[in-house]
Image (cartoon, rainbow, N blue to C red):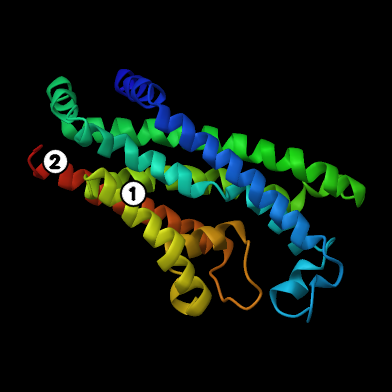
Amino acid sequence: MTGLVRAEWRKLLSTAAAWWLAAGAVALTAVSTAGTILANGREGGGPGGGGAQALARVLDSPAGVRNVIASAGAGDLFVLLLGVLALTSEYRHATITQSFLTTPQRGRLVAAKLAALGVVGLAVSVLDCIVNLAMALPWLGTRHLHTAVVTGDTGVVLATVLVGTTLYALLGVGVGALVRNQVAAVVISLAWLLVLDGLLIGLVPAAGRWTPGGAAASLHRNLAPTAHFLPAWGGGLLLVAYALAFAGAGTRLVLRRDVT
């Protein structure tokens, strides 16, 4: 099994798309961190000063610091796409037949992809956290909040970012197994996470909290002040359930259907 996982790493790291997606995750984390810092830095929160702006202007509050640190999870979408490409690329480039001939037990191949992408997702999330802290620490330092990052609430948020990003990688493999057409899988993932998920969270919070994006937001506790999300542990369990459900359903489908 270790050999299979290493082979999957080699496959993934030999593609330019994987490196670009990893770079995109880090870049989006930097942009999101900067945006959150700038939003939190507006004295008075802008015209009106209500709603989300009222939360944003509380620079030195635990919620303000937590939201800055939670920005390290902004690159989750790119990691999910990494998981999608890990399997759909095999179908697109017609290498899946050779992979199944090399490893006739299809379940072992999918398990190896899940393990490999889990490690890659964790590695990318570590880089995201490093970039986030490299930007956040100087800002927190100007407000004499040096220890807030490594203790208490924000330390927990960093841990949830590592867990959440890793789960998104596994979720991506599951989506790729279910929708083996690469273009369709990517479009569905983008449409759901960038459009439908956001609409549900923003317009119907009672339903949005049960989506993958709502689960991730609950896990990181990076929440809008008017939304009613799950507690952090509930969001984490829900995201685990999504990852297991998609990975399990995708694996079952790979085992049953023809390669062509």
Gap between marks 1 and 2 measured at Cα: 22 Å
As helix, strand or loop, the secondary structure at mark 1 comes to helix
Residue 25 screen position, x and y as percent: 54, 41
Any part of residue 223 in sight: yes
The residue at the point 62 percent across, 45 percent down is 29
Q: Nearer the viewer, residue 238 or 182?
A: 182
The residue at the point 84 percent across, 49 percent down is 140
User: Which residue position holds label 2?
Assistant: 255
Q: Nearer the viewer, mark 1 or mark 2?
A: 1
Residue 214 screen position, x and y as percent: 49, 65
User: Which residue position holds label 1?
Assistant: 186
Residue at far top of view: 3
Give the quadrant of the C terminus. Answer: top left
Tell me where residue 219 sits by quadrant.
Answer: bottom right
- The type of residue carrying mark 2 is Leu
Give the quadrant of the N terminus. Answer: top left
